[in-house]
Image (cartoon, grey):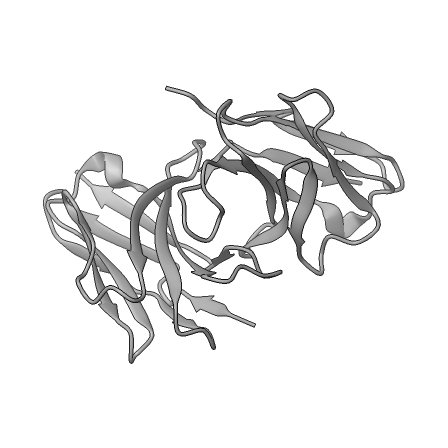
């Protein structure tokens, strides 16, 4: 059964370093997303991506964040200069239909620890 | 902004029992979608059930059903004949039909434990 895969499963980084989280969405899906969950908090929407551009983004998704689909299969989230408060589980998801109507398929998450 | 509240951080029931997880939400939209997602330990979140707000009939999927009370803004999940494999975090989520910067808004989750 097709799955969304994410790498790395866990990354530890120093504050101020750049981090790239990678995702391989399900191949026939058109919409891609990043969500994050700070420990003990809610899962929060970061950004949605469709047709090679950002379609929606939340207030959390500031200039420190960027997304890219460099090669038609990978979907990446870059954090330019990590802060302690960026420590969280980051979930990638994809869907056939737009997020507000269709089922999202999530990856297992990438745990980011910023020291 | 829309909000989703799950008031039960953890629940525990015996196998084969019926359990109901509660969820309340707030939105200014008249049409929207509601979801329950399940996240087993160390596994991906998967969709359990989905409800469109304009449909009065409660959604059902095998042992899973919802009690959707639009006026009360309540969307509870009932699991019948619970099984050990139902042990997971359950997240209630809301999506506005018009989309928007809130994305899919999740509650904090309920950790459901099914005891043998």
Q: Residue furthest bottom?
A: B71
Q: Toward which corner of the image does residue A104 lie, by quadrant?
A: top left
Query: Does A16 sit above or below residue B12?
Result: above
**Residue B51 can be seen, yes or no:** yes
Q: Nearer the viewer, residue A2 or B82?
A: A2
- Image coordinates for residue B108, horizontal then vertical, percent: 47, 58
Q: Can you say which quadrant of the picture contains the C terminus of chain A? A: top right
- Image coordinates for residue B110, horizontal then vertical, percent: 37, 55
**In the figure, is residue B116 to the left or right of B4?**
left
Query: Does B45 sit above or below residue B98?
Result: above
Q: Toward which corner of the image does residue A74 lie, by quadrant?
A: top right
Q: Nearer the viewer, residue A89 or A65?
A: A65
Q: Residue furthest front?
A: A51
**Residue B21 can be seen, yes or no:** no
Residue found 32% across the figure and 65% down from its top: B53
- Image coordinates for residue B101, horizontal then vertical, percent: 62, 60
Q: Can you say which quadrant of the picture contains the N terminus of chain A? A: top left
**In the figure, is residue A90 to the left or right of B81?**
right
Total residue callouts: 0
**In the figure, is residue A70 to the left or right of A38?**
right
- Image coordinates for residue A96, horizontal then vertical, percent: 45, 36
Q: Toward which corner of the image does residue A114 lie, by quadrant?
A: top right
Query: Does B7 sit above or below residue B59?
Result: below
Residue found 79% across the figure and 54% down from its top: A62
Residue found 21% across the figure and 36% down from its top: B84
């Amino acid at each position: 059964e097709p799955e969304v895969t994410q790498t790395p499963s866990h990354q530890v980084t120093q504050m101020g370093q750049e981090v790239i989280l990678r995702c391989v969405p399900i191949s026939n899906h058109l919409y891609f997303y990043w969500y994050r969950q700070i420990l003990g908090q809610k899962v929060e929407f970061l950004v949605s991506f469709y047709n090679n551009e950002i379609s929606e983004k939340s207030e959390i998704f500031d200039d420190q964040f960027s997304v890219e689909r460099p090669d038609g299969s990978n979907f990446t989230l870059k954090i330019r200069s990590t802060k302690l408060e960026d420590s969280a589980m980051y979930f990638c998801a994809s869907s056939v239909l737009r997020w507000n109507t269709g089922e999202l398929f999530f990856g297992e998450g990438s745990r980011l620890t910023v020291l | 902004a829309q909000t989703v509240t799950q008031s039960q951080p953890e629940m525990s029931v015996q196998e084969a029992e019926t359990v109901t997880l509660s969820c309340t939400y707030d939105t200014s939209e008249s049409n929207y979608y509601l979801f329950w997602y399940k996240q087993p330990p160390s596994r991906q979140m998967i969709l359990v059930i989905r409800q469109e707000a304009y449909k009065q009939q409660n959604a059902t999927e095998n042992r899973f059903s919802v009690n959707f009370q639009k006026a009360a803004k309540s969307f509870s999940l009932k699991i019948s004949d619970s099984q050990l494999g139902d042990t997971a975090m359950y997240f209630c989520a809301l999506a506005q039909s018009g989309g928007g910067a809130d994305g899919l808004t999740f509650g904090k989750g309920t950790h459901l434990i099914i005891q043998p």
